């Protein structure tokens, strides 16, 4: 097998992996979701030592952790627009239920305001998930090899140079914005200092925009460094603020 054919096959394999069907079973995926289920049960059982609204908040926190762990598993092993959108919606719903439980500790106008904010955040998160799904339909197209130059009829030396240019273009790793966003979010979930933070991620033409609120400047800097380390990112605009 000549080198040119190897390069083309390698590029084709990468594109196929990027668009692998959501129903393809994967041992690593099942291992992650099984671990998430086990961790959730342990966390939920630990909530039995509490009572009242504190217990309810504890249980909802365990559910959020599980939803995020499941979302991380999807991002790593079932990276399709439909699966990602569902996983993100599940996280948004779990975070909403947690916020409602936390609002239960308040009363009067403060409780009403808290509930309204929780609902607004849920709607925004679900809208973001839907937008990600729509953008994700272009992933396969964005990962297709670039148009190749016709080398037919060229002299030997020129033809060799032409084929080299085509090979470089074929194997160029063009990463779709939705893939970048998904990878950054998955990395945020895996980071112990950032996984529980309210960090919103958007990517446009390789430029990543971070927004939201975190407890410290150190976490702002860490989130930006994490985003910069993702393949395909050309710039990070850090709009995170300390709450």
Image (spheres, grey):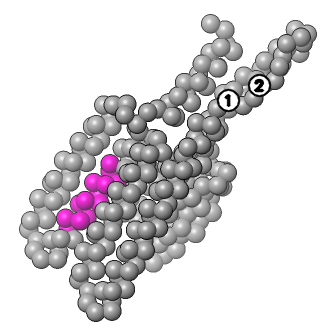
Pick the residue in front: 22 or 91.
Answer: 22
Is 234 left or right of 71, judged from the image as shown? right
Name the residue located 34 percent from the left edge and 80 percent from the top edge: 115
What is the magenta segment's predominant secondary structure? helix
The image shows residue 68 at horizontal and vertical percentages of: 34, 54
Query: Residue at point 40% right, 55% down?
Result: 88
Where is 205 relative to 47, above or below?
above
For the point 47% across and 56% down, the residue is 129
Classify the position of the N terminus by image quarter.
top right
Neighbor class of circle 1 (other Cα within 10 Å; few <14, some 14-19, many 20+) is many
Q: Name the mark on residue 237.
A: none
Examine the rendered structure and indicate whether residue 106 appears above or below residue 130. Answer: below
Q: Nearer the viewer, residue 86 or 186?
A: 86
Q: Which residue is mark 2?
A: 148
Quadrant of the rendered image containing residue 142: top right
**Above or below: residue 185 compared with residue 242:** above
Quick one: 190 or 28, which is closer to the camera? 28
Horizontal and vertical percent position of residue 237: 63, 63
Q: Can see residue 226?
A: no
Task: Give residue 131's position: percent from left, percent from top.
Answer: 53, 56
In the image, residue 167 lies at what x, y percent? 72, 22
- Look at the image and tell me in which quarter the C terminus lies: bottom left
Inspect the magenta stretch and tell me whether residue 68 lies in it. yes
User: What span is colored magenta in the figure?
Assistant: 58-70
Q: Are marks 2 and 1 in contact (CB under 8 Å)?
A: yes
Using the image, tell me which numbered label, if any, was put on residue 145: 1
Q: Is residue 231 above or below residue 26?
A: below
Element on which disc 2 rests: loop
Alpha carbon of mark 2 to alpha carbon of mark 1: how far? Answer: 8 Å
């Amino acid at each position: 097998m000549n080198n040119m054919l190897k390069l083309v096959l390698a590029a084709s394999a990468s594109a196929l992996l990027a668009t692998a069907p959501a129903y393809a079973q994967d041992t690593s995926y099942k291992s992650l979701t099984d671990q998430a289920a086990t961790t959730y049960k342990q966390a939920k059982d630990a909530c039995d030592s509490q009572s009242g609204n504190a217990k309810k908040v504890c249980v909802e926190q365990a559910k959020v952790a599980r939803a995020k762990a499941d979302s991380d598993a999807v991002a790593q092993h079932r990276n399709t627009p439909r699966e990602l959108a569902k996983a993100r919606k599940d996280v948004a719903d779990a975070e909403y239920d947690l916020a409602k439980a936390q609002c239960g500790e308040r009363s009067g106008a403060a409780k009403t305001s808290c509930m309204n904010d929780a609902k607004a955040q849920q709607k925004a998160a679900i809208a973001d998930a839907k937008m990600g799904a729509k953008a994700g339909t272009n992933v396969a197209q964005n990962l297709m090899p670039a148009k190749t130059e016709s080398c037919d009829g060229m002299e030997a030396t020129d033809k060799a140079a032409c084929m080299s240019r085509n090979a470089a273009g074929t194997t160029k790793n063009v990463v779709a914005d939705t893939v970048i966003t998904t990878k950054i979010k998955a990395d945020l979930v895996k980071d112990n200092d950032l996984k529980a933070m309210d960090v919103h991620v958007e990517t446009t033409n390789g430029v990543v925009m971070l927004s939201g609120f975190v407890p410290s400047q150190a976490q702002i800097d860490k989130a930006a460094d994490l985003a910069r380390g993702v393949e395909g990112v050309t710039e990070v605009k850090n709009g995170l603020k300390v709450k």
